[in-house]
Amino acid sequence: MVATDQDDKSGKGEFKRSASHFADRITGDARDGWPVEAGRYRLVINRACPWANRALISRRLLGLEDAISLAVTDPIQDERSWRFTLDPGGVDPVLGIAFLSEAYDARERNYPGGVSVPAIVDVPSGKLVTNDFQQITLDFATEWTGLHRDGAPDLYPEALREEIDDVAESIYRDVNNGVYKAGFATHQETYDTTVRQLFARLDQVSQRLATRRYLVGDTITEADIRLFTTLVRFDTVYHGHFKCNRNKLSEDAVLWAYARDLFQTPGFGDTIDFDHITRHYHQVHTNINPTAIVPIGPDLSSWLTPHHREQLGGTPFGDAEAPGPVPAAEAVPPTGRAA
């Protein structure tokens, strides 16, 4: 759900993220009318979007690639929002549509809100099922278990859910959403307050991670996925484009090592397209960057340098196993990879 002018802004120059309007859930008992079913649904993402990136990472870690197909939109939006111009003929080959908005219209004609990703579309009907980015990954972890790959990790273990929720909520408020609130602030006081809150939270998280490899427990959980998708974009876009420049991620030894540790873990870095990230933020947010000039930095090769986080104990997947190679059709093009 990369922020656009369709997101609400208060009269005080403060960015306010629109709530997910379509919050149906796909569950084992089909309580909302949408049963878990292999091959029925299509996950629509944009690789620039941190919220969509969460869903992509979860899908890959849990091995749901064969159960839920993937559509990737162009990083550059037009007046109809997310478009399938990366596909032959500019049409998604499964849904048969040129714009994600068509799936929204199939669900609710004249829907007045923004068209956001991640979105899950029901293939038979062509209707949007959900754009609830907060719930999608939790349901992947808990409702889709019958279709998880052999050796899939438990990303939302029941015994740790309260702690995961608590950690993730503060990170969402001050970090995930905080960078947007800073970037779209139109009053100095709002910007100053938001940036202070952002870095106060990052400092707190850095202290937490100084003595433990992962945010909650000894393995990767939902909380790590949610933090990672902001950290991996920090120096590339948030530090400069969103003016979150008290310091770079790479200048915090703990957070930088933590982010590199995750980036080098199968299922994380192999979902990241730095080309899409950089072009989207700088060419779509013309109210922030009116020239639409795309910067050439930073140097991405440092993402592959040693992190030494294994010295803290813990393992990425515990008794579970790492996912296999990325499906060829879903691999990030060389232009977007860390060299």
Image (cartoon, helix red, strand yellow):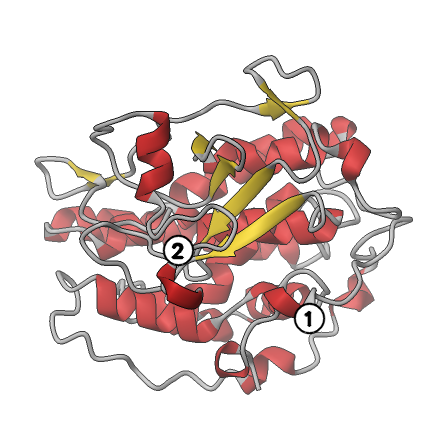
Say few, some or many: other residues with alpha carbon within 10 Å of mark 1 (under 14 / 14 to 19 / 20 or more): some
Could you tell me which quadrant the C terminus lies in?
bottom right
| Quadrant position of residue 256 | bottom right
- Where does the image place residue 18, in percent across and percent down from the top left? 29, 34
Q: CA distance from mark 2 to mark 1?
A: 25 Å
Corner quadrant of residue 302:
bottom right
Whether residue 239 is visible? no
Q: Nearer the viewer, residue 52 or 237?
A: 52
Determine the residue positioned at 34% across, 34% down.
104
Q: Which mark is residue 199?
A: 2
Position of 278 with respect to 223 (left or right) is left
Q: Establish if 242 lies above or below 18.
A: below
Q: Is residue 11 left or right of residue 243?
A: left
Residue under the point 75% across and 27% down: 158
| Residue ranking furthest to the top | 31
**SS category of the residue bearing label 2:** helix
Closer to the camera in the image, 103 or 142: 103
For residue 253, say whether it is visible. yes
Query: What's the mark number on residue 264?
Result: 1
Residue drawn 54% across the image and 82% down it = 334
Nearest to viewer (mark 2 / mark 1): 1
User: Hey, what amino acid is under mark 1?
Assistant: Gln
Residue 155 at x, y = what percent?
Answer: 72, 41
Q: Position of residue 51 (x, y in %)?
A: 46, 48
What residue appears at the point 41 percent right and 70 percent down from the top-left corner? 276
User: Outermost residue toward the right?
Assistant: 319
- Is residue 209 left or right of 145 when viewed as pictured? left
- The answer to whether marks 2 and 1 mark residues whose Cβ atoms lie closer than 8 Å is no
How crowded pointer 2 is (Cα within 10 Å; few <14, some 14-19, many 20+) is rated as some
Residue 215: give x, y in percent of width and height: 66, 48
- First in sequence: mark 2 or mark 1? 2
Amino acid of disc 2: Phe
